[in-house]
Image: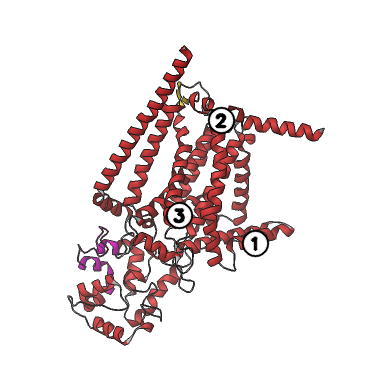
Amino acid sequence: MNLLAFIQRAEAYLGERLPVHKLSYDAMVRKKEVPVHRLSWGYYLGGLALFFFAVQVVTGLMLLFYYQPTVSDAHASVEYITEHVPAGALVRNMHAWASSMMIAVVMVHLLTTFAMKAFARPRELTWVSGAVLLLVTFGLGFTGYLLPWHQIAVNATKIGLQSIEEVGAYLPGALSEWPRLIKETIQGEASVGQATLSRFFALHVVILPLTMVAVLVWHLLSVQLHGMSQGVDEPPKWKEKFFPTFFIKDLSVWGVAFMVLFVVALCLPFESFYAYPLFEPFDPKGSTPDGIKPEWYFYFVYYPLEILPFWVVLLLSLVAGVVLFLTPWIFRETSRRTLRLLAAAAALYLVVMTLFGEQIYRLFKG
Amino acid sequence: MKISFHFQWQWLSLAACLLPAALGAYPEYHAFVVKHSGRPINCAMCHRHPDGPDGAAPGQLGRLTPEAQERLGRARSAFEPGVKVDSPILNEFGNHMVQALGRKQLMELKMAPEQLAERLPADSDLDGDGIPNVREFLDGTHPLNRNDGHPWLLFRHNLSRNLTQIALTLAATAAGLWGLGHLLRGFASATQLKEEESEDS
């Protein structure tokens, strides 16, 4: 009896969060409306992230024709793509820039969704699926970083994996072995080598993209079934039709994003922001250049790791992770005004650590 | 446990270039560029091998064939400017410097490396990235890598070089969006009309 009641409650809960009875052309397209207000620009960010993901898939497939996932050939194949394949440099730059743009847009999307309280009932699971997508996006960034097999790629990955192992020192009993096992499983051998590259390649081109698509289907379906959240406390100025008005605007935003991406990828090599020794092929016997660090989107955790004791960063990361996934329940009663302030504070932290992390590091460490 | 790898290799990298000082390398230039640009660089700016000429790897002194040693000897005797050299331990930029200034002047300038940029040909651009070698030397970017350079200068150069392609892509994107927009509006109107007709009937 209790089990039946539990199943009924779970069914009702899921039914409210994913109202499949609304799965119709009328509800999802014809009658769907989008509120227009001062924060309605936030409604375009999810679509923009989707656009950059699509660019990643298309350019990634193109790169697959030439990329060789072996330690002996990976760097040479990337160099071949850049120097000899027609439009290879453009495709590779588009892939690299689109990944950065996607992560930037996903982070802003997360913050605006939070500020607009778009996670409130019945959209809790939409938020959770978004948080999973964020982690998968970071995973794609981390695994993709290793593939060119140059100095910065291999050395930064070594440090990233090493930090997983460090966590074991703060866990009790048998749990303390888990981080080492996880690291070894990802790494595949004693040090970062061919097994690591093979595993990162598999993760980057198959496992994570498939996970992304699966969660994305849930996320998008959920968004379409519920419609856009109200976003602000006051009633919207007006509502516009999702199709064709909002949809055409969304496509226009994609067009602008494509042009920005195209111009940047064509005119600004992604590598120009790093010193050239970092892009030499990884040589296990050679000297390692300085300036090894992760991609910019990990600076918000990388610089604190450099400045603060490891356990402090670990604790803060754990709290942030729990808060991220439990946001719909933790901030259920919080006003939108407070949420906007919190989102602004988080945005300020991310911007400061990303742009000025190096200076802050020097300030503390001399 | 602290994870710190930020600047630990800086001195190793510098030491690698300083080591071959006795063998005719110019570590003063390396030290100057590191200080002036604030970027981590290595010996690959002028040498064939990133760790400099000392060693037995390809592009280093220990791996030279008799023919390569002969070329090295000729390059080392190029004391005056204008002599075409092809040193097996130097890359194209390194050879370009020897050819432009001569070894005598290069050795003299070791005491004032900041003057090297003033003496090198101002308009020479070996990698064709729009940034002269002299500027790349001062910026600590690679004069032979067209993807490495001051980002803003690279952007400006590539933008002016690719203006036609950008204009064509812009026109295609705008036309595509315009057409797609009209097509979607047409679909919406047609659907609405059909619904109105069915309601009337």
Q: Nearer the viewer, mark 2 or mark 1?
A: 2
Please report whichever mark, 1 or 3, sits nearer to the chain's N-terminal start.
1
Q: Nearer the viewer, mark 2 or mark 3?
A: 2
Q: Residue at x 48, y 57 (%)?
A: A145
Q: Quadrant of residue B86?
A: bottom left
**For the residues marked 2 and 1, what is the alpha-carbon distance in whole angstroms?**
42 Å
Q: From this viewpoint, which residue is outermost toward the right?
A: A1
Residue A244 percent location from the top left of the image: 42, 27
Q: From this viewpoint, which residue is outermost toward the front?
A: B201
The image's mark for residue A261 is: none
* A351 part of magenta stretch: no
The residue beneath circle 3 is A358
Residue A61 percent location from the top left of the image: 44, 53
Q: Residue at x 69, y 30 (%)?
A: A12
Crowd band around label 1 with a 10 angstrom C-alpha radius: few (<14), some (14–19), many (20+): many
Residue A236 percent location from the top left of the image: 48, 22
Out of A140 and B107, give the one closest to the viewer.
A140
Q: Chain of mark 2?
A: A
User: Which span is picked out in magenta?
Assistant: B110-137
The residue beneath circle 2 is A225
What kind of residue is marked 1?
Answer: Arg
Q: Nearer the viewer, mark 1 or mark 3?
A: 1
Q: Residue at x 41, y 61 (%)?
A: A78
Give the structural element (helix, strand or loop) at label 3.
helix
Residue B80 visible: yes
The residue beneath circle 1 is A180
Q: Chain of mark 3?
A: A
Crowd band around label 3 with a 10 angstrom C-alpha radius: few (<14), some (14–19), many (20+): some
Quarter that holds the N terminus of chain A: top right
Give the structural element (helix, strand or loop) at label 1.
helix
